[in-house]
Amino acid sequence: MPIRMLLRSLMITWILSSPRLVSLSVPIMNRISYSPSWFLNPDRNPILHRLVRGIFYNHFCAGENAKEVDGTIKSMKKMGFDGVILGYAREILAGKDVAPSGSSKEIVEQWKRGTLETLAMLGPEDFLAIKMTGAGPIAVKAMTKGELPPPVMLEALTEICDQASKQNTRLWIDAEQQVFQRSIDAWTIDLMRKYNRSGKILIYNTLQAYLKGTPKNIAHHLSLAQKEGWGVGIKLVRGAYIMIEERQLIHDNIEDTHVAYNGIVQNLLSRKFPGVSEAEEFPNLQLFLASHNAESVQRGYETWRERRRRGLPTIKLEIGQLQGMADEVSCGLVQIRQQMSSAGIAIPNAEKEWYPRAFKCLCWGSTRECVQFLVRRVVENRGSLDRTKAWLAGLKKELMRRVKSSVRLG
């Protein structure tokens, strides 16, 4: 990690580790996100735009246009990351956003064009993150009612998936509020049926471990795939909508969520899962751990490594964190491979596809859209103060290591 990025990460993480500073900053960010005032809109007020860009946008976000995003992606891969996940920052929250102008068909067309524009910024084996609500009111209405995707939406999804398949860029469908999620799961399973064939996993669904029903939902995905002969891609997160979801759907405390997350990972890496038949072959499965929790990442990696060492069945594993967050976890994954290379330990070509690969998840969009995205991420992480303090300690340790190294060299 470049020293400038390390220092900026240290400052931002220090702010996130302080409940008082977070409590002060969230209302300000919310005001900037949704205020109708020209003065408080960073996309219209050039002074505010510059302040927001300098303070936190450049740390957490990939850019406002293709040129800026391309530069960020190249810098991530130069640091040693195997790839990136890129998504457009905008989403619709139930009861929050004003309906966009234009006909439903025009809005879906705009969403499709923006998604294809994002896809064009990515390379082979990267991920495109898609939010279904971005397609506007026609998609939101269909998902809320539990209906099939409207024809215009299905046509757009097909074009996006076909192009992703053509350029070998994978797609993950982001989780959203539960009012939409059942439909998102059903639509995503239909896409998996079509595109996750012949050993190729193109489509990933996002499953949230903080929901009590997630193990049953995973078993449903796996059982259908086992029966019908297609593959499953799972991106596993803890959850992002705890402040606005029905509380009874969510585990009673964070400890139960940790247990659920780690248990799901252990079962999937072992190619066994409660509720999935062991009498038939386990379906083709690939797992992406999207986690800022160092313990979960370490457990998952060590379980995978031990199973590989002992010749036990396992699955392809990839791991990633958001840009600007948990940098010591992300860089630790990169360093594992770099240390092996420095020690002269070569990874055979046959193993490279299976070796846990490190990714960074990036968002792009206007300054205001990305502030809205960041508010959701800060709220998501504000209950994990101990974890944020651990990030801070790790960054301080790395800074001191570099200072001591510079003194010795001097």
Image (cartoon, rainbow, N blue to C red):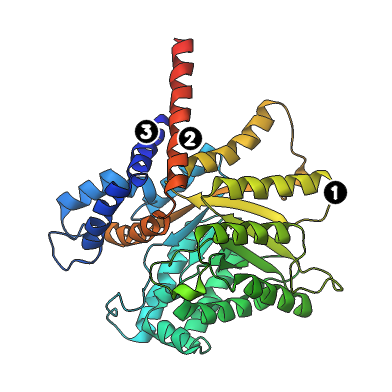
- Pointer 3 local density, CA inside 10 Å: few below 14, some 14–19, many at least 20: some
Q: Secondary structure at mark 2?
A: helix
- Are the residues at dot 1 and dot 2 in contact (C-beta closer than 8 Å)? no
**Inter-mark Cα distance, 1 to 2:** 33 Å
User: Which of label 3 and label 2 is nearer to you?
Assistant: 2
Q: In the image, is 258 to the left or to the right of 88?
A: right
Q: Secondary structure at mark 3?
A: helix
Front-most of residues 267 and 110 = 267
Q: In the image, is 391 to the left or to the right of 257?
A: left
Residue 7 disc label: 3
**Inter-mark Cα distance, 1 to 3:** 42 Å
If the image is split into quadrants, where does the C terminus sit? top left
Q: Residue at x 43, y 66 (%)?
A: 242
Residue 394 disc label: 2
**Going by the picture, which residue comes out furthest to the right?**
279
Front-most of residues 309 and 99 = 309
The percent coordinates of residue 47 (x first, y second) are 15, 49
- Residue type highlighted by circle 2: Gly
- Pointer 2 local density, CA inside 10 Å: few below 14, some 14–19, many at least 20: some
Q: Residue at x 36, y 45 (%)?
A: 59
Q: Which badge, 1 or 3, comes first in the chain's sequence?
A: 3
**Going by the picture, which residue comes out furthest to the front?**
252
Reading the image, the residue beneath label 1 is: 311
Compared with residue 175, is residue 381 higher up or lower down, i.e. above or below?
Answer: above
- Residue type highlighted by circle 1: Gly
- Residue type highlighted by circle 3: Leu
Q: Residue at x 64, y 70 (%)?
A: 215
Please indicate, yes or no, whether residue 350 appears anywhere in the rendered image. no
Compared with residue 173, is residue 193 higher up or lower down, i.e. above or below?
Answer: below
- Pointer 1 local density, CA inside 10 Å: few below 14, some 14–19, many at least 20: few
